Amino acid sequence: PAGPEAQELARRHVEWLTSVPGTPAHGARGKGCREYVLALADMYVEDERFAANYGGREGAEFVRAALRHHV
């Protein structure tokens, strides 16, 4: 999760999240964005529908770890 490739993907993921109009992260920086990203990362793991997008719980846990490290 802390490696350069994972961190580049985490950066792009956060960049995408801040570009989505109508979401709490839209145009956000700092604490508000951090809290939003971390909450989503937890949801990716806890909700099997989201975890499926990352290959299941194990993949979602990796994504969460990368996002936590990034923010």
Image (cartoon, grey):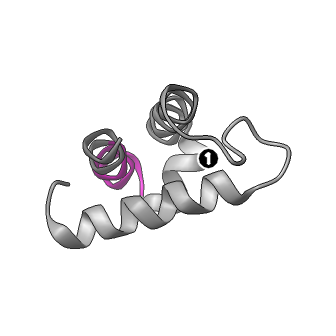
Residue 43, placed above or below residue 64? above
Between 48 and 42, the one lying in front of the other is 42
- Residue at image point 34% right, 55% down: 59
Q: Position of residue 35 (x, y in %)?
A: 51, 26
Magenta stretch, residue numbers: 56-64
The local crowd at label 1, few if under 14, some if 14 to 19, many if 20 or more residues have their Cα within 10 Å, is few
Q: In the displayed structure, does residue 69 sit left or right of residue 2?
A: right
* Displayed quadrant of residue 2: bottom left
Residue 17, placed above or below residue 40? below
Q: Position of residue 22 (x, y in %)?
A: 85, 44
- Residue at image point 14% right, 63% down: 3
Pointer 1: what residue?
49
Q: Is residue 16 magenta?
A: no
Amino acid at dot 1: Arg
Quadrant position of the N terminus in the picture: bottom left
Quadrant position of the C terminus in the picture: top left
The number of discs equals 1
Q: Position of residue 18 (x, y in %)?
A: 64, 52
* Displayed quadrant of residue 36: top right
- Residue at image point 45% right, 60% down: 54
Q: Is residue 58 magenta?
A: yes
Q: In the displayed structure, does residue 38 sit left or right of residue 20?
A: left
Q: In the displayed structure, does residue 47 sit left or right of residue 59?
A: right
